[in-house]
Amino acid sequence: MSPKGHPLMLSTRRARLVINRVRLFAFLFAVLTPMWCAVDYWVFEAPLWYYLAGLRLAASGCFIGLLLLPAREQMRDAYRALMLLFAIPTLFYIASHNLLPGNQLSDFSPAVATGYAFLPFVLMAGVAIFPLTVKENFLVAVAVMTAQLLAGYLNWSTLNWPSFDAGTWLLLLIAAVVTMASMSQLAFMLVLVRQLMFDPLTGAHARRCGEEVMHIYWLRSVRRGEPLSVAFFDLDHFKVINDAYGHDAGDQVLCQFTQLLGATVREQDLLVRWGGEEFVLLLEAKRADAYEILQRLQAKGFGLRPDGGPLTASVGLAEREADCASSMEKLIELADQRMYRAKRAGRNRICVS
């Protein structure tokens, strides 16, 4: 219904998809829009042809500008690109629709002029290729319907009311069908992203997705000057559990660990299953605060082993600013190295330097 609450992974991939499709359409419109000048030249007399050619060239230039407009993989940039994609032909439609009724048309020109009236329908149908929510579809439909009503208002005296009413009603029906198609795309995309995002056993973020989301966290931390810490966990003597009690028991221990950790850390923190019994916890906190959080987690315990003993972990901690890390990869590598130091020092401890 609304983009509020969408996972960051979904928003990023949806923004990328929307921006790529906007650019594809901008390229097609930039090429095809001026080519129609030949048809206008054939059917319309001067000076109408000159006006229409000027409008087409101006629209084509705007589409080229949209094609070259830099955009990041954020929904804010995707909304801007989508708005411009629909604003350019909408303004062209209003301007051209205001020109045509004031000129004498003959031969094939009325048929070609009628084709200009189909532009809102093309725009509305084009929304179907974008994975949008109900709210987003509604806003686009309102913009296109406003253009349709404004064009009718500007030609109030010469308006063919039965045809205009039928066209407006058809536009509403297309908007409803397009909304269903757009929502179906979004629902399918959401299912695929969820499958990609989470480890099927533990429910933690999968490594591939986690790396992508952590990179986004890194960029945001650098841009805003905010702290960012990484804790690298390795469950102590986990191989013994698999060898002595079987892999099912080991799976239960992993699930227990992620449930306890997920219930304790904050909502904005990110837990990633890195592989096997290794996990990475991303904390938006300074090193001292992150170390305090890890100490509380360690004191609370990470669960129980199948024999009833406490489950422990060796943890390495690194922080972006304190450790002068140059990239997300370097920060994770540093936390990984410190985790191995914790194991060599006797396990069940946190290494921060």
Image: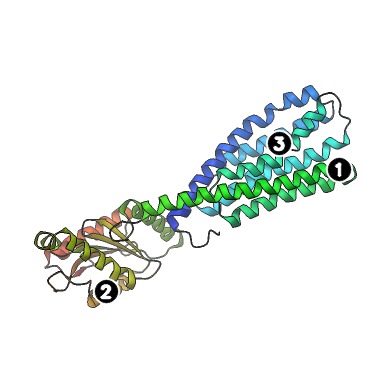
Residue type, label 2? Leu
The disc, 3 or 1, on the residue closer to the chain's N-terminal end is 3
Give whichever of 171, 311 is nearer the camera: 171
Q: Quadrant of the N terminus?
A: bottom right
The amino acid pointed to by label 1 is Leu
List x then y, in percent, for residue 290: 31, 70
Q: CA distance from mark 3 to mark 1?
A: 27 Å
Q: Nearer the viewer, mark 3 or mark 2?
A: 2
Residue 263: x %, y % from top left? 33, 72
| Pair 3/1: label in front | 1
Identify which amino acid the numbered label 3 is placed on: Ala
Which quadrant is the C terminus positioned in?
bottom left
| Residue closer to the observer: 314 or 272 | 272
Residue for point 46% across, 62% down: 224
> Image point 68% across, 26% down: which residue?
35
Q: Is residue 105 left or right of residue 40?
A: right
The residue that label 1 is drawn on is 159
- Residue beneath disc 3: 58
Q: Are marks 3 and 2 in contact (CB under 8 Å)?
A: no
Residue 271 x/y as whole percent: 32, 62
- Helix, strand, or loop for circle 3? helix
Distance (Cα) linking label 2 and label 1: 72 Å
Residue picked out by circle 2: 297
Sequence order check: which comes first, mark 2 or mark 1? Answer: 1
Which residue is at a point 30% across and 57% down the rendered structure image?
331
Label 3: few (<14), some (14–19) or many (≥20) C-alpha neighbours in 10 Å: some
